[in-house]
Image (tube, rainbow, N blue to C red):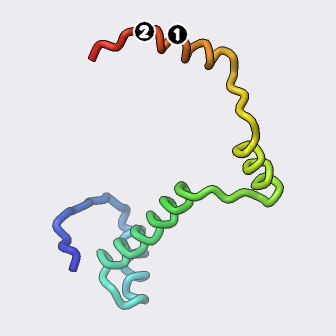
């Protein structure tokens, strides 16, 4: 069982409060439970959307070809890497 020991507060208008109370009553839960359930579901959707990349079929194929193809790093990046190797690290 999850212990609910954290608290969040939010300020809302009277109209929004009435709407939330009506929606919670229609679903048979408290306003707090209604808000928490909706917020958790929406948060999970947002996080999942940011953790996954969906590509169209042709974009997917181009992406795989780019991963499997030869590496051609920009010359300026190669030069910076060589300079970085010559520097002494001081930790």
Q: Quadrant of the C terminus?
A: top left
Q: Left or right: where does residue 49 sit relative to residue 75?
A: left
Where is the N terminus found, in terms of image quarters?
Answer: bottom left
Is residue 29 found left or right of 85 in the rendered image? left
Is 22 above or below relative to 54? below
Question: Neighbour class for label 1 at 10 Å: few (<14), some, many (≥20)?
Answer: few
Q: Which residue is mark 2?
A: 87
- Report the disc number at residue 83: 1
Q: Is residue 13 above or below residue 65?
A: below
Tell me, yes or no, whether the two marked residues, 2 and 1, touch with CB atoms within 8 Å: yes
Which element type, helix, strand or loop, lies under badge 2? loop
x, y percent for residue 90: 29, 13
Kindly identify the residue that appears in the image at 30 percent across and 82 percent down.
Answer: 30
Give me the C-alpha separation between circle 2 and circle 1: 7 Å
Residue 64 position within the rendered picture, expressed as x and y whole percent measured from the top left: 73, 50
Asked whether 1 or 58 is in front, the reply is: 58
- Report the front residue among 73 and 51: 73
């Amino acid at each position: 069982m999850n212990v609910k020991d954290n608290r969040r507060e939010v300020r809302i208008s009277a109209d929004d409060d009435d709407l939330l109370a009506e929606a919670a009553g229609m679903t048979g839960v408290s306003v707090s439970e209604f808000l928490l359930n909706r917020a958790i579901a929406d948060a999970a959707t947002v996080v999942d959307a940011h953790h996954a990349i969906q590509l169209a079929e042709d974009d997917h194929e181009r992406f795989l070809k780019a991963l499997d193809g030869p590496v051609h790093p920009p010359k300026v990046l190669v030069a910076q890497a060589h300079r970085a190797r010559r520097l002494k690290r001081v930790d």
